[in-house]
Image (cartoon, rainbow, N blue to C red):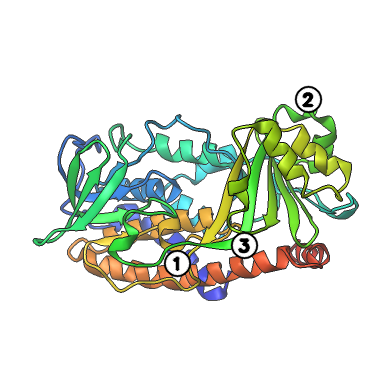
Amino acid sequence: MPAVYRARAEQLLEWSRYSFQTTPRMSLVQGERGGLDMSSTHHPIAIIGAGLGGLTLARALQIRGVSAAVFDLEAGRDVRAQGGMLDIHDDTGQVALRTADLYAGFEKIIHPGGQALRLLNHDATLALEQRDDGTGDRPEVDRGDLRDLLLDSLPDGTIRWGAKATGVRPLDEGGHEVTFGDGTVITADVLIGADGAWSRVRPLVSAASPAYTGISFVELDLLDAEARHPGSAALIGGGFFIALDGERGFLAHRETDGSLHVYTALRSAEDWLDGIDFADVTVAKTALLAHFVDWAPAFQSLITDADGPLVPRRINALPVGHRWDRVPGVTLVGDAAHVMSPFAGEGANLALLDGAELAVAIADHPADIEAGLAAYEEALFARSEASASTSAASLELMFAPDAVTRLADLFAEHH
């Protein structure tokens, strides 16, 4: 991260060390237990989306005495597996967790050995191997564990589950109205879109929409790897794994439950995935294998031995430098603001930091929330543009003919 953004992160971290005693409480303070009346049709602050950014925002506001209601389309917290490992960066995600007073809990869910790395060529020859000695600045955690940490930190009733936003509009008298799939309607003085790449809130501030990057993923899992898939477990190793040939690749993690989570990645037409019947696992595996016939058998086994369904995923991104003019009473965090490719590991970290910084901005401007939102967005735009540019460049690097050689040099230099 550029020095200017690291300095901002350090400033935020320093602020978090004393803000609990010095921040003026807004007029929107919570009761003794911090509970919310979710039956109300009006909320001073409404957050749409209970992902990492929205939850961090709610938590960081709550410990500063500011109430916020969270609405999420999922029926409950355990409806679906969260999946995937996240490397939490010391200058973004970790700063946010300190700001939310959750760093001690974060340390308890770090995956020992998760920062190990194996980089291979498509013929299974090893290009680089690095062990996790515990001194790295990007420890790995399970996304589900991190989400649980955030959820468990919030007072009961903060989140209304099963609330899928279907319509959002500004009100003539100020504020915004949100309509949900069940017909429920709420209004909010401050509306925050934390609802991901296809945000319902984003059109209030921006006409931009994510576009296909040229890369498609197919995700798969190998369960109980040491016992059931020892060859694949040895291939992947204990942490992060990359194998590339310029147009295709495998990215994988050893999960905390002993499974292997694998992403097959291909540079392909946007409609490539539409031609595969993913409801038929055998058909899907055969179609995917056809793109790796010239790869070593060990890689093909990752596909043939996969447990459960294969999950297709197009990689989309908003334009680098996405920004908008200030719109009173509304703003965005996380992928709603700056969805980008995952090839720099920035998305989740920025979502965490967005939530933390927005909470600080709101709590730091109790008499003029608009000023706080403007200050937040000014920092957000610069930070997200830098990260989106890095992510776009990393995509091109990883799907270039000499990707393995260049990555080996970069990883060795960083290590």
Query: Mark 3 or 1 closer to N-term?
Result: 1
Residue projecting furthest to the front: 275
Residue at coordinates 86% horizontally, 41% vertically from top-left? 298
Q: Amino acid at mark 3?
A: Gly
Residue at x 71%, y 68% (from the top left corner): 397
Examine the rendered structure and indicate whether residue 411 appears above or below residue 291: below
**Cα–Cα gap, marks 1 and 2:** 48 Å
Q: Nearer the viewer, mark 3 or mark 2?
A: 3
Left or right: residue 18 compared with residue 307? left
* Residue position marked by numbered label 2 in the rendering: 228
Work out how far the residue at label 3 is from the one at label 2, CA to CA, in angstroms: 34 Å
Q: Which mark is residue 264?
A: none
Q: Is residue 317 left or right of residue 164?
A: right
Could you say which disc has been placed on residue 11 in the image? 1
Q: Nearer the viewer, mark 1 or mark 2?
A: 2
Question: 10 Å neighbourhood of mark 2: few (<14), some, or many (≥20)?
Answer: few
The residue under label 3 is: 214
**Residue at 38%, 49% in the rendered image:** 54
